[in-house]
Protein backbone atom coordinates (compact mmCIF):
# COMPACT_ATOMS: atom_id res chain seq x y z
CA UNK A 1 0.00 0.00 0.00
CA UNK A 2 1.32 3.44 -0.95
CA UNK A 3 1.56 5.94 1.92
CA UNK A 4 0.13 9.29 0.84
CA UNK A 5 2.03 12.30 2.19
CA UNK A 6 1.20 16.00 2.47
CA UNK A 7 4.14 18.41 2.85
CA UNK A 8 3.69 21.61 4.90
CA UNK A 9 6.62 24.04 4.98
CA UNK A 10 6.83 27.74 4.23
CA UNK A 11 10.08 27.33 2.25
CA UNK A 12 9.61 26.14 -1.32
CA UNK A 13 13.15 24.77 -1.51
CA UNK A 14 12.58 22.65 1.58
CA UNK A 15 9.36 21.25 0.14
CA UNK A 16 11.12 20.44 -3.13
CA UNK A 17 13.91 18.62 -1.27
CA UNK A 18 11.40 16.65 0.81
CA UNK A 19 9.39 15.74 -2.29
CA UNK A 20 12.54 14.51 -4.04
CA UNK A 21 13.35 12.23 -1.10
CA UNK A 22 9.82 10.88 -0.72
CA UNK A 23 8.93 10.34 -4.36
CA UNK A 24 12.00 8.15 -4.86
CA UNK A 25 10.44 5.53 -2.57
CA UNK A 26 8.04 3.10 -4.21
CA UNK A 27 5.81 2.92 -1.13
CA UNK A 28 5.60 6.70 -0.57
CA UNK A 29 3.86 9.38 -2.61
CA UNK A 30 3.51 13.16 -2.16
CA UNK A 31 -0.10 14.11 -2.84
CA UNK A 32 0.11 17.81 -2.05
CA UNK A 33 1.99 20.75 -0.58
CA UNK A 34 1.13 23.64 1.75
CA UNK A 35 3.07 26.83 2.43
CA UNK A 36 1.49 27.67 5.80
CA UNK A 37 -0.69 26.24 8.51
CA UNK A 38 -4.02 27.35 7.02
CA UNK A 39 -3.14 25.73 3.70
CA UNK A 40 -2.09 22.57 5.56
CA UNK A 41 -5.47 22.30 7.31
CA UNK A 42 -7.34 22.86 4.05
CA UNK A 43 -5.16 20.45 2.04
CA UNK A 44 -5.40 17.74 4.71
CA UNK A 45 -9.20 17.92 4.58
CA UNK A 46 -9.33 17.87 0.76
CA UNK A 47 -6.61 15.31 0.06
CA UNK A 48 -6.98 13.07 3.13
CA UNK A 49 -3.32 12.00 3.26
CA UNK A 50 -2.00 9.25 5.51
CA UNK A 51 0.79 11.45 6.91
CA UNK A 52 1.37 15.19 7.10
CA UNK A 53 5.04 16.22 7.30
CA UNK A 54 4.61 19.49 9.18
CA UNK A 55 7.10 22.29 9.80
CA UNK A 56 6.32 23.71 13.25
CA UNK A 57 7.59 27.22 12.61
CA UNK A 58 5.61 28.90 9.85
CA UNK A 59 4.31 32.48 9.56
CA UNK A 60 0.67 33.06 10.43
CA UNK A 61 -0.92 29.81 11.53
CA UNK A 62 1.92 27.72 12.93
CA UNK A 63 2.41 24.01 12.52
CA UNK A 64 1.32 23.60 16.15
CA UNK A 65 -2.07 25.19 15.56
CA UNK A 66 -2.45 23.40 12.21
CA UNK A 67 -1.73 20.08 13.93
CA UNK A 68 -4.36 20.76 16.57
CA UNK A 69 -6.97 21.77 13.99
CA UNK A 70 -6.35 18.82 11.69
CA UNK A 71 -6.72 16.34 14.54
CA UNK A 72 -9.64 17.96 16.38
CA UNK A 73 -11.68 19.25 13.40
CA UNK A 74 -11.37 16.17 11.17
CA UNK A 75 -14.73 15.96 9.34
CA UNK A 76 -14.63 12.29 8.33
CA UNK A 77 -15.44 9.07 10.15
CA UNK A 78 -12.04 7.53 9.41
CA UNK A 79 -8.99 8.50 11.48
CA UNK A 80 -7.20 11.77 10.70
CA UNK A 81 -3.72 11.70 9.21
CA UNK A 82 -0.68 11.17 11.37
CA UNK A 83 1.43 14.28 11.91
CA UNK A 84 5.23 14.14 11.70
CA UNK A 85 6.64 17.50 12.76
CA UNK A 86 9.90 18.90 11.43
CA UNK A 87 12.16 21.24 13.36
CA UNK A 88 15.56 22.84 12.95
CA UNK A 89 16.36 22.60 16.64
CA UNK A 90 16.37 19.53 18.87
CA UNK A 91 13.83 19.76 21.72
CA UNK A 92 12.35 22.98 20.36
CA UNK A 93 9.51 24.22 22.59
CA UNK A 94 7.19 24.31 19.59
CA UNK A 95 7.80 20.59 19.06
CA UNK A 96 6.74 19.99 22.66
CA UNK A 97 3.51 21.85 21.97
CA UNK A 98 2.93 19.96 18.71
CA UNK A 99 3.31 16.63 20.51
CA UNK A 100 0.89 17.85 23.15
CA UNK A 101 -1.53 18.70 20.32
CA UNK A 102 -1.37 15.12 19.05
CA UNK A 103 1.55 14.88 16.62
CA UNK A 104 2.96 11.37 16.30
CA UNK A 105 6.62 12.32 16.41
CA UNK A 106 9.29 14.74 15.32
CA UNK A 107 12.32 14.77 13.09
CA UNK A 108 15.18 17.21 12.67
CA UNK A 109 15.34 18.87 9.24
CA UNK A 110 18.95 17.78 8.78
CA UNK A 111 18.10 14.09 9.24
CA UNK A 112 19.33 11.72 6.50
CA UNK A 113 16.86 10.97 3.67
CA UNK A 114 16.48 7.34 4.71
CA UNK A 115 15.51 8.44 8.23
CA UNK A 116 12.78 10.70 6.87
CA UNK A 117 11.34 7.84 4.80
CA UNK A 118 11.55 5.53 7.81
CA UNK A 119 9.83 8.10 10.05
CA UNK A 120 6.94 8.46 7.63
CA UNK A 121 6.46 4.69 7.52
CA UNK A 122 6.62 4.44 11.33
CA UNK A 123 4.00 7.10 12.04
CA UNK A 124 1.78 5.82 9.21
CA UNK A 125 1.81 2.45 10.98
CA UNK A 126 0.57 3.99 14.22
CA UNK A 127 3.87 4.20 16.09
CA UNK A 128 5.57 7.29 17.51
CA UNK A 129 8.75 8.41 15.79
CA UNK A 130 10.86 9.01 18.87
CA UNK A 131 13.98 7.01 19.54
CA UNK A 132 14.10 5.74 23.14
CA UNK A 133 17.21 7.82 23.86
CA UNK A 134 15.36 10.94 22.71
CA UNK A 135 12.04 10.11 24.37
CA UNK A 136 13.41 10.36 27.92
CA UNK A 137 15.10 13.70 27.21
CA UNK A 138 12.09 15.09 25.38
CA UNK A 139 9.45 14.18 27.95
CA UNK A 140 11.61 15.25 30.90
CA UNK A 141 12.15 18.66 29.32
CA UNK A 142 8.54 18.94 28.20
CA UNK A 143 6.90 18.22 31.54
CA UNK A 144 8.98 21.01 33.07
CA UNK A 145 7.51 23.59 30.68
CA UNK A 146 4.67 25.90 31.75
CA UNK A 147 1.30 25.00 30.23
CA UNK A 148 -0.20 27.23 27.57
CA UNK A 149 3.25 28.00 26.17
CA UNK A 150 1.91 28.15 22.64
CA UNK A 151 -1.59 29.49 21.96
CA UNK A 152 -4.09 26.92 20.78
CA UNK A 153 -2.61 23.94 22.59
CA UNK A 154 -4.63 22.32 25.37
CA UNK A 155 -3.34 22.47 28.92
CA UNK A 156 -2.94 19.15 30.74
CA UNK A 157 -5.26 18.02 33.46
CA UNK A 158 -3.80 18.84 36.89
CA UNK A 159 -4.30 15.27 38.15
CA UNK A 160 -4.39 12.23 35.85
CA UNK A 161 -4.47 9.56 38.55
CA UNK A 162 -8.22 9.00 38.29
CA UNK A 163 -7.92 8.30 34.57
CA UNK A 164 -5.50 5.46 35.26
CA UNK A 165 -8.25 3.51 37.05
CA UNK A 166 -9.50 2.48 33.61
CA UNK A 167 -6.33 0.45 33.04
CA UNK A 168 -5.58 -3.13 34.07
CA UNK A 169 -2.44 -3.85 36.07
CA UNK A 170 -0.69 -5.19 32.96
CA UNK A 171 -1.67 -2.10 30.99
CA UNK A 172 -0.17 0.07 33.71
CA UNK A 173 3.08 -1.89 33.36
CA UNK A 174 3.06 -1.30 29.63
CA UNK A 175 2.31 2.40 30.17
CA UNK A 176 5.28 2.74 32.52
CA UNK A 177 7.58 1.16 29.95
CA UNK A 178 6.23 3.47 27.25
CA UNK A 179 7.05 6.40 29.52
CA UNK A 180 10.58 5.06 29.95
CA UNK A 181 11.00 5.25 26.17
CA UNK A 182 10.90 1.55 25.31
CA UNK A 183 9.77 0.42 21.88
CA UNK A 184 7.12 -2.26 21.39
CA UNK A 185 9.83 -4.85 20.79
CA UNK A 186 11.63 -3.89 24.02
CA UNK A 187 8.37 -3.94 26.00
CA UNK A 188 7.62 -7.39 24.61
CA UNK A 189 11.04 -8.65 25.76
CA UNK A 190 10.69 -7.07 29.20
CA UNK A 191 7.24 -8.52 29.89
CA UNK A 192 7.51 -11.82 28.03
CA UNK A 193 4.83 -10.89 25.51
CA UNK A 194 4.63 -10.95 21.72
CA UNK A 195 5.01 -7.70 19.80
CA UNK A 196 1.47 -8.14 18.45
CA UNK A 197 0.18 -8.44 22.01
CA UNK A 198 2.04 -5.31 23.08
CA UNK A 199 0.73 -3.34 20.09
CA UNK A 200 -2.82 -4.39 20.98
CA UNK A 201 -2.32 -3.34 24.62
CA UNK A 202 -0.85 0.02 23.58
CA UNK A 203 -3.90 0.67 21.39
CA UNK A 204 -6.23 -0.20 24.29
CA UNK A 205 -4.31 2.11 26.62
CA UNK A 206 -4.63 5.02 24.18
CA UNK A 207 -8.35 4.36 23.69
CA UNK A 208 -9.11 4.07 27.42
CA UNK A 209 -7.14 7.21 28.26
CA UNK A 210 -8.52 9.19 25.31
CA UNK A 211 -5.06 9.88 23.85
CA UNK A 212 -3.81 10.26 20.28
CA UNK A 213 -0.44 8.52 20.55
CA UNK A 214 2.16 6.94 22.84
CA UNK A 215 3.99 10.24 23.29
CA UNK A 216 0.95 11.70 25.02
CA UNK A 217 0.67 8.47 27.01
CA UNK A 218 4.25 8.84 28.20
CA UNK A 219 3.65 12.45 29.21
CA UNK A 220 0.50 11.51 31.12
CA UNK A 221 2.33 8.69 32.94
CA UNK A 222 5.02 11.10 34.11
CA UNK A 223 2.54 13.79 35.11
CA UNK A 224 0.56 11.17 37.06
CA UNK A 225 3.69 10.20 39.02
CA UNK A 226 4.18 6.71 37.58
CA UNK A 227 7.76 7.66 36.71
CA UNK A 228 9.83 9.42 39.39
CA UNK A 229 11.28 12.80 38.29
CA UNK A 230 14.72 12.55 36.73
CA UNK A 231 14.30 8.99 35.48
Image (cartoon, rainbow, N blue to C red):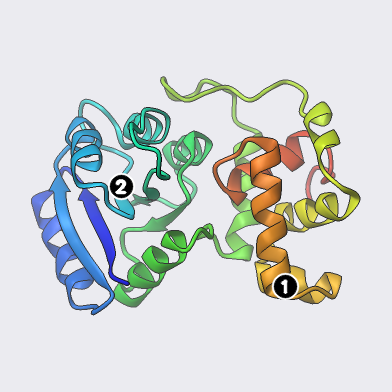
Mark number displayed over residue 54: 2
* Residue 63 shows in this picture: yes
Q: Quadrant of residue 198?
A: bottom right
Q: Earlier in the sequence, mark 1 or mark 2?
A: 2
Residue 148 appears left or right of 183: left
Label 2 environment density (alpha carbons within 10 Å; few <14, some 14–19, many ≥20): many
Q: Quadrant of residue 131?
A: bottom right
Mark number displayed over residue 186: 1
Residue 200 appears at what percent x and percent y?
68, 60
- Residue 34 vs 75, above or below: the answer is below
Label 1 environment density (alpha carbons within 10 Å; few <14, some 14–19, many ≥20): some
Could you tell me how far apart the alpha carbons at marks 1 and 2 are, in whole angstroms?
Answer: 29 Å
Q: Quadrant of the N terminus?
A: bottom left
> Tag 1's secondary structure?
helix
Mark number displayed over residue 153: none
Q: In the current view of this chain or complex, which residue is farthest to the front?
A: 77
- Residue 69 vs 113, above or below: the answer is above
Residue at image point 65% right, 67% down: 183
Q: How many marks?
A: 2
- Residue 98 vs 32, above or below: the answer is above
Residue 156 appears at what percent x and percent y?
63, 25
- Residue 226 vs 5, above or below: the answer is above
Residue at image point 31% right, 59% down: 109
Residue 5 appears left or right of 105: left
Residue 94 appears at what percent x and percent y?
42, 37
Residue 209 appears left or right of 62: right
Residue at image point 46% right, 66% down: 122
Residue 102 appears at what percent x and percent y?
49, 39
> Tag 2's secondary structure?
strand
Amino acid sequence: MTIRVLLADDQEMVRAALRAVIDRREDLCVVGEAADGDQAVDAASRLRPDVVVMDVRMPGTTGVEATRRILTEWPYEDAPPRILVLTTFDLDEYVHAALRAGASGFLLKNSPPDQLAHAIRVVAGGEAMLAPSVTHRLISAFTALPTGLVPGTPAPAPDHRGRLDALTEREREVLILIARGLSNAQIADALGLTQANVKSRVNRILTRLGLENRVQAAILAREAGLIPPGR
